[in-house]
Each structure stands twice: as C-alpha cells, then as structure tokens.
Image (cartoon, rainbow, N blue to C red):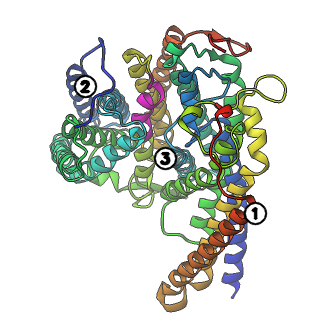
Amino acid sequence: MESIVFGIGITALAGALATVAGAAENTESDIGSQGDPNSQVQLAPQMGYLHRIFNKAIAGEPPAWGLWIALGAGIAWAFMAMQINPILAIVLGAALATFVQGVYATTAYLGRIASLAKFGQPVFIDILKSMTTVTMAHAFVAIFAAVTVCHLMNAALGHPFPLPLLGLVWGIALGAAGSATGNPFYGKERQYQNQKYGAGVPIAASGNIVRYAEAGERNSLDNGWFSARLGGPASGVCFGLIVFLELWRTVLFEQIGAGWGAIIIGIIIILVFTVIDRYIEVWARKNFGAYVKPTEEAS
Amino acid sequence: MTVKVEKIEGGIPHTTIMIAGLVASVILLYLTYANIAVGTEYFAFFGGLATVAALIWGSHTIKVLCSYGIGTGVPSAGMIAFGSGVIAMLFATKYGIAAPIVAIVLAAIIGAIIGFVANNVLNMRIPVMIQSLTEMAIIGAVILMGYAAMMTGSFELTSLITGKVSILGLSLPSYQASFIGGGLIAVVFMLGAIAIQHPFNACLGPSWTQDRMLMLAAECGFLSMITAAVMSMAIVSMGAALVSLLVAIIGWYYTYTKYIELSYRDAASWVDSKPIPETEGQ
C-alpha cells in the first residue's frame, strides 16, 4: 500500500512538471515559428511580404525536442555516473542542451534568411539577439522539467530504460504534444488573424501573415505573449495529462493480470477521450457555425 | 518520374565530396585504433573528427536527394540514414579491426535495399534515390561508429557494452554504465540525425550557396562533438575527454564565426533595429 501511495505522489509530481514543460515548449516553438506554421513564415518573403518574425527551422518539433531532451538526459546521466548530485547533474545537462538549442536557432535563422536574399528579406540582428535568448530561456525550463520527469520515472518508479533513452521517448512525445496542441493556435489564430473565420489559407493568401501589430510592427515576442496565454497552457495540459495518465495506469493497475490490467485501462482511457473529443467537435460546430468561403478583400 | 526542381550550380561536384568524405572518415576512424596500439585513450578525438567529415558529405547528399522537391522530407532523410546505419554499425563492431569496413559494406547493402523498396515498391521514382540512400546508410553507420570510438576509445563491441562504476574508490565493470547499456547510443543517434539534416534544412531557398551549407555542416558536427566529449567523461579517462572537448571547441568556434561571415556575405542586407523595408507595389 505504501509503495502505491509513493507511486501516486511521484505520478502527481511528474504530471505537474510535464505541464510546465509542455507550456514552455509551446511558447518556445511559437516564438521561433517552428513546426507547421513555419512554412507560411518561410513563404511570406517569397510572396512579397517581408517580415520581422523569427524563423528558426530545426527539423519538426518532435525530432528537435527528441534531441534536446535526450541530450539533456544524456549529459545528466554522464554526470550522475561521475557521482555528481542528480539535481546539479540535471541542471548542467539542461544548460548544455539549451546552449546547443541556442546555437541551432541562430544558424537556422541566419541560413534561412540568407537564402531568401533574392527577395530582399534583411537579416534583423535585433530579432536574432532578443528572440534567441527568450527561446533559450523557455527551452531551459522545458528541458529541465522533462529531464526531471524522466529521472523520477527511472529512479523513483524503477523504469527499466536508461535515462537517455527515456529522454528520447519523452522528448519526442513532448514535441508532438506541443506541435499538435499549440501550433494550430499560433498558426491559424495569430498569423492568419486577417482572414475570415474558417476561411483556411487559400492560395491567394499564402504567405500573407500578420506582420503589423496594434501599433508598429509585430515580432515574435508578441506572438509568444499571445500564445503563452492559451496555446501554451493547452499544450501543457496535453503533455501533463499524457505523462500523468500513463504513469497512473502503470502504478495502479500493473499488478493486475501480469501487466494486462494496465493495457486494458490504457485502451479504456483512449476510448473515453475519443468520446470527449467527438462531443467537443460537434459542440463547437453547432456554436461557431459552418466554414465560410474566403472573400477577395482578404488578399 | 519526379522533376528536378533545383540545380547545383558551380561549386564542388558531389562525387568529389563523396569520395573525400568517405576516405577521410575511414582514415580518421582507423586513427582511433592508435589507442589500442599504444595503449592509451588520447586518440579518441579522431572519432569525433570522422563524424565531422561524414556529416559534411551527408549534408550534401541530402541536398542532392532533396533537390527533387522533397521539402518536408529533409529531417526524415536524416532519420532514415541513422535508422539503417545503426543496424550495420552494431553488427560490424563484432569484427574487431575490420569493423569500419564491415559497417560500410553492410550499410551499403541495407541502404540499397531501402532505396530499391522506396523507388520500386513505394513508387517514388526519384533517379538518385538508390544511390543517395546507400550513401546515407553508410554515413549513418560511420557517424555512429565515430561517436562510439570517441566516447569509449574503441569501436569494438566489448568496449561499447562495458563501462566502469567506482564504488568507494573501487572500479568495477558495469553494463549499466556503458555506451550501449546506458542508452548513450540513443543520444548520439539524435545528435547525428539532427546535425545531418540541419545544414540543408536551414540553408534551403533560392539563394542557397554550397560553401555556406558545408560550413554549417562542419559547425553542426563540432557542436555535436562538444556535447559528445562532455558525455564521454563518464566512460573514457578525463584527460582523453578534455582533449576531445578542446579540439571540438576550437573547431566549433572557427566554423561558427566563418558561417556567420558567409551568412553576412549572402544576406540581402544586415540591419539592426530597423523597420521592414518598403517593397515595390505596396
């Protein structure tokens, strides 16, 4: 009984840390225009819409975050193998992984913008300086929280995988959660605010992202501020629920039927979420109306 | 048949880069064997240099493959390189001094099979597909072997699955603290896979230039080598790890500043805190 209470405590702590990691991850990728909204940011100068948006394309979010978390976990593992205190080891691992993320972000921005020279898109050094540091700060929070989740699974719950392998698995899951939950909010709600509701992105509006703010010109920090209010927490709840429910079903039901109990509970959770998702979709359609055709004035 | 949408104009031809990359990485891998010949670990950093050579070759192979309009397929090309390469690399480590050669031959066979399936079963019909995926599998195997040699001092299986744990001053052999048992192979898999796709993914566009992309490939290689050197501190001796770290930092600093210079050369303009420039017709 005592071990189950301990396991549930660890589960709750890991879920809370995962929520923080998800929120920070999504804000980081939105400031960097990573993930699927990137294609429109990349396209904009080619359509004549020069912009001051940070464009750091480092693969998709899942592979990139697979690397950051696996790297943080690998370095933390190495320091722990050298008998260094786990908390210090995780901090050092997260710091080095954040350094790598920052270097990748600068090279991605410089490379993408220099390759758009034909369309006159300038490299904005102030964008590079101010956005990279903000994404690095968010990346540190996300990497530290996610590596701590992996360490809790490994050390407290006795997961058989070594720490770096757990980091790879949960890093990809974190990137996928942020990409699936947060990106629609950033890409469709923020970059395409000038389109009618439900209009999608017709070819005539390709690359016509929002470049001007309420006053002055918009940069990616404004996008970070916008998506940190709803998109970030939504991604955090998504990843937090994934980690919490995954550990919860394992801790409570693994003993039943030689492990089959946890698998059956997992299938039941998927079915429950399918019903909830369908209900929300139907409810949203009823309340917000059908999709409308794009109008000419939008382009 | 897919139409080639981008052309490589000028610069070094791909065949030259391929031969140079293959020869350089194999020679550098064999230089790590000096560790066993002399009985030290200080030559481990040659493994890291082998990965840099292979990454430069690999980034150009991705450029050749992805010039057939595979825009979103750039990161997946890196993943398939390492997914096919890891099989060949792990199998080859059993063959002692012949390991790099066995890995290259085996990876070529695996890559050719994957390329054949992609082109003829999945009907992708890209002319360079079989050659490129063969190259990618070899590159993946060589890079993984380079990191293994750098982080353990040797590319033989026994050293990859035994690490050392010191308890109260006693040094005991342990599978849990090894390159494979500790899961470090998962980290170098991602380090290489992101580093190999990043140069072309970051530099793609109408004003792509070859020297800038290859410089970025070297930068990614040295950056990955820095972190691999830090992780190797847990496995090889501290002195050998510090030599690797020093070589990596010097190489990274040089290539990073060079890359920024090349970006400055290629960019339309380079401005600080300026508004969006006015364009015609707006």
- At a point 19% along the width and 24% down the height, the residue shown is B19
Q: Left or right of A143: which side holds B26? A: left
Based on the displayed image, in which of its 4 quarters is residue A106 positioned?
A: top right
Circle 3: residue type: Pro
Measured along the vertical axis of the image, is residue B216 above or below residue A240?
above
Name the spot of residue B68 as percent of width and height, x first: 31, 32
Point out which mark residue A287 bears: 1
* Mark 2 and mark 3 on one chain: no
Q: Is residue A222 left or right of residue B208?
A: right
Depth check, front residue: B122 or B48: B122
Element under disc 1:
helix
Predominant SS of the magenta segment: helix
Residue type at mark 2 is Ala
Whether residue A140 appears in this view of the structure is: no
Between circles 2 and 3, the one closer to the viewer is 3
- In contact (CB < 8 Å): disc 2 and disc 1: no
**Could you tell me which chain the residue with mark 3 belongs to?**
A
Residue B204 lies within the magenta run: yes
Question: What residue is shown at x 70% (from left), y 29% (from top)?
Answer: A131
Residue identified by numbered label 3: A63
A34 relative to B223, above or below = below
- 2 and 3 marks in contact (CB < 8 Å): no
**Mark 1, residues whose alpha carbon is within 10 Å: few (<14), some, or many (≥20)?**
few
**Disc count in the image?**
3
**Magenta-drawn segment:** B194-205
**What residue is rendered at 74% in x and 58% in y?**
A288
User: Can you identify the residue that label 2 sits on?
Assistant: B24
